[in-house]
Amino acid sequence: MSVKAAVNSNAAADSRIILSGGNIMGETLTRSDVRKIEEEIEYRKLVVRKEAIAAVKEARAQGDLSENFEYYAAKRDKNKNESRIRYLERMLKTARVVSDVSRDGEVGLNNTVEVYFEDDDETETYKIVTSIRGNSMSGKISIESPMGRALLGKKAGDRVYVKVNENAGYYVVIKSVQNTTEDADDKIRGF
């Protein structure tokens, strides 16, 4: 497996570990993350909740509940929405809010970083994001992934060791750092 494939695999595994453990609380968020979470909570409470309750009532009115698939599907969707609301509210209560402003030329949140993989002789571009926005398949690396942790605070020209685990790691060279801002593609990850 190439180093680049290992990065994508490990970053994705990092996200799965956080999600499957169910304990993403104590999350590091930016003010923008908080705003997006609050917007999602409001939307789910004001729009999705009403639609889900209406769907349950409509399905219940169809008669015998013991064989009513629509009723169980509507209840499942309603419960999933309520679970997501609780999850997001708990995340906000326990979050550590940080600034996404970084020093010029230094890798920080929302920066786009061009990285040279020495072992593969390849260059890749990644955006450094909070873990609730991380998606290594679309070039968004979480600050909590091995690559994200290694790059934070470094500058163009730095040779950085990315520690994958106790026994493995690799070196990358930071080719460039661009201060970028959040864009429309920076969506909060679902569960």
Image (tube, rainbow, N blue to C red):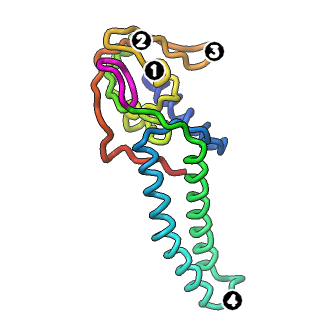
Residue occupying the point 55% across, 51% down: 191
Is the residue 84 above or below the residue 179 in the image?
below
- Residue nearest the viewer, comparing 65 with 25: 25
In the rendered view, does 95 fall on the left or right side of 158? right
Indicate which disc, 3 or 2, sits on the residue closer to the N terminus.
Answer: 2
The range drawn in magenta is 101-109
Residue topped by disc 1: 2
Which class describes the residues within 10 Å of circle 1: few (<14), some (14-19), or many (20+)? Answer: few
- Residue nearest the viewer, comparing 150 with 33: 33
Marks 3 and 1 sit apart, C-alpha to C-alpha, by 18 Å
The amino acid on which the numbered mark 2 sits, given as a three-letter code, is: Asp
Which label lies toward us, 2 or 4? 4
Q: Are marks 1 and 2 in contact (CB under 8 Å)?
A: yes
Residue topped by disc 3: 166
Residue topped by disc 4: 64
Which structural element holds mark 4? loop
* Residue 176 screen position, x and y as percent: 28, 18
Indicate which disc, 3 or 1, sits on the residue closer to the N terminus.
Answer: 1
Indicate which disc, 4 or 1, sits on the residue closer to the N terminus.
Answer: 1
